[in-house]
Amino acid sequence: MKKLKIKNNKEVISGVNYYKSQDVCKLTGLTYKQLDYYDRTKFLTPSINKALGYGSKRMYSFNDLLKLKVVKNLLDAGISLHKIRKTKKYLEMTGDSDDFLRVTLISDGNTVYACYSDKEIIDTLNSGQAVFGIALEKVYNKLKEDVGKFLSNNEQNV
């Protein structure tokens, strides 16, 4: 593993900034077989140096490492690889690489949602269908306020 310089949330690659497969396995918790499978199926390929046959070394960037770590977290949460592939495809279609750092992924174990703000949650498995959430505390506070106004208005009218 070599030291990696970060500049404005972008990785600076200067020929020595890479992670070997064994380092990636240690840092992400993925097995070598998983890395190999992801590369062979073109799911997540190393961006610095791809395996080009026997004896060649895969070399991963920090951004590659980040994506692999997210995959590992989703796998640990019980999300199938098929659903993770669909989520990855959705994220790649909807934004640039900086969007990846702005999204929060939420899952109920069945689907994966991309949360870009407290008002925008997208179902990544259903072609970006919007879903909604209700913050119960906000509903409670608003209802309490409305009931207070209602009661004070009724007392004045009696």
Image: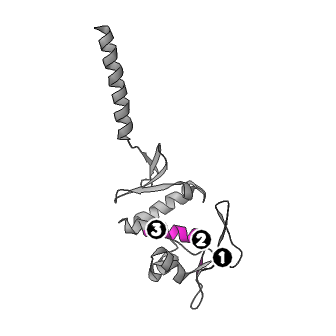
The answer to whether 137 is drawn above or below residue 147 in the figure is below
Question: What is the secondary structure assignment of the residue under circle 1?
Answer: loop
Circles 2 and 3, Cβ within 8 Å, touching? The answer is no
Q: Which residue is mark 1?
A: 17
Q: Main secondary structure of the magenta part?
A: helix
Disc 3 and disc 1: Cα gap in Å?
Answer: 22 Å
Front of the two marks 2 and 3: 2
89 or 79: nearer the eye? 79
Q: Residues within 10 Å of mark 1 (few under 14, many from 20)?
A: some
Residue 127 shows in this picture: no
Residue occupying image coordinates x 40% and y 68%? 75
Disc ID at residue 71: 3
Quadrant of the rendered structure where residue 145 is?
top left
- What is the three-letter code of the residue carrying label 2? Phe
Question: What is the secondary structure assignment of the residue under circle 3?
Answer: helix
Region rendered in magenta: 57-72
- In the rendered image, residue 136, in percent from the top left (x then y), is placed at 35, 40
